[in-house]
Amino acid sequence: MTAPESVLILAAHGSSHERAKTALAGFSLRVRNSHPGLRVLVAHTASQSPHSHRSGPCMKEVLETLSPATAPAVIAVQSLHVIAGGEFDRMSALCLEFASRTGSDVRVAGPLLACTHDAPLVAKALAGSITECITHRDGPTRQTGGADEAIVLMGHGTTHAAQQLYRALAARLALERPLTYLGVLEAVDPHNSLSVQAIIRTLTARNIRRARLVPFLTVAGRHAHNDLAGPEPGSWKSILAGHGIESTPDLTGLVERDAFARLWLDSIATLMGLRPKPWQGSALHPPKG
């Protein structure tokens, strides 16, 4: 049973897209239902630039509501990021600064891909959830698109060294589920193996003319609806069409897929038990006493 003085912060990039906000709110409710009585807050970690697409309070604002006079015994932070990239680093640094300044016990559980050792678990969850989704939407007789349809996953990508985590996952996916390819928006060099152009070359070489487009993003917000599946010439859907590849979008964020929701719920359960696993990170501020 979670101690009543504990608080859990769900840290996500954030989005102003209505479907994305609904998905995040739905997961937050699922967490509350799994931990009755636990105070659950949502904090967004996107850049605070004028062009930010987040909607809602940022991590700094949420932390500052937990003043030293009213701060709970434990502040648990569950990252809902996909990789341990620059945004996760900045969020962790903010939590460390708050813990040092206020003497609070702040604990952080890492994202889905905190290190390359997480790739097998995430690949397995992806393979299973995509198959389940295809079966549900297209009827019980169709488990996958068959040998003539690929699954193309779009991640955000980063200039951070954590980009290697996408590569590790892509390699593992090739073993878990053939004809599943992972690319990222940040891979603008067509020679980059994570670019959509590299994926198209592979599909063309294998004479694959159909693909299902799936966001490898926490929520299906602006990037999923515009950059992946939008009608604009630069979207992945349009780029694939320009190469003779017909595509069908599956705009479901990871937090909406049960396999990934359960991964995060398991991580939260461990975090609230104050027994972080090595891949989840450790306490930023050691327990008092």
Image (cartoon, helix red, strand yellow):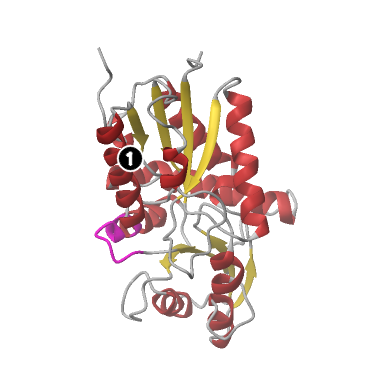
Considering depth in this image, is 107 or 266 the residue closer to the camera? 107
Identify the residue shown where x is 67% and y is 56%.
Answer: 19
Q: Position of residue 113 (x, y in %)?
A: 36, 47
Q: Position of residue 119 (x, y in %)?
A: 35, 47
Residue drawn at the location 61% of the way across and 56% of the way down: 144
The picture quadrant where one finds residue 67 is top left
Taking depth in this image into account, of 124 and 161 the one nearest to the observer is: 161
Label 1 CA crowd tier, 10 Å (few <14, some 14–19, many 20+): many
Q: Secondary structure at mark 1?
A: helix
Res. 114 visible in picture: no
Total number of numbered labels? 1
Position in image of residue 203 (x %, y %): 47, 75
Relative to 281, does residue 90 appear above or below in the rendering?
A: below
Say if 78 sits above or below 223 in the image.
Answer: above
Pick the quarter of the image with the C terminus: top left
Left or right of 224, for residue 281: left
Residue lying at the far right of the rendered structure: 139
Q: Is residue 202 above or below residue 175?
A: below
- Left or right of 286? Residue 136 is right
* Magenta extent: 158-166
- Which residue is the site of mark 1? 95
Q: Residue furthest front?
A: 69
Q: Amino acid at mark 1?
A: Cys
Q: Is residue 135 visible?
A: yes
106 sits left or right of 266 in the view: left
Please tell me whether residue 261 belongs to the stretch shown in magenta: no
Q: Is residue 161 magenta?
A: yes
Q: Picture coordinates of residue 258 (x, y %)?
A: 59, 40
User: At 49% across and 57% down in the image, what residue appears?
Assistant: 216
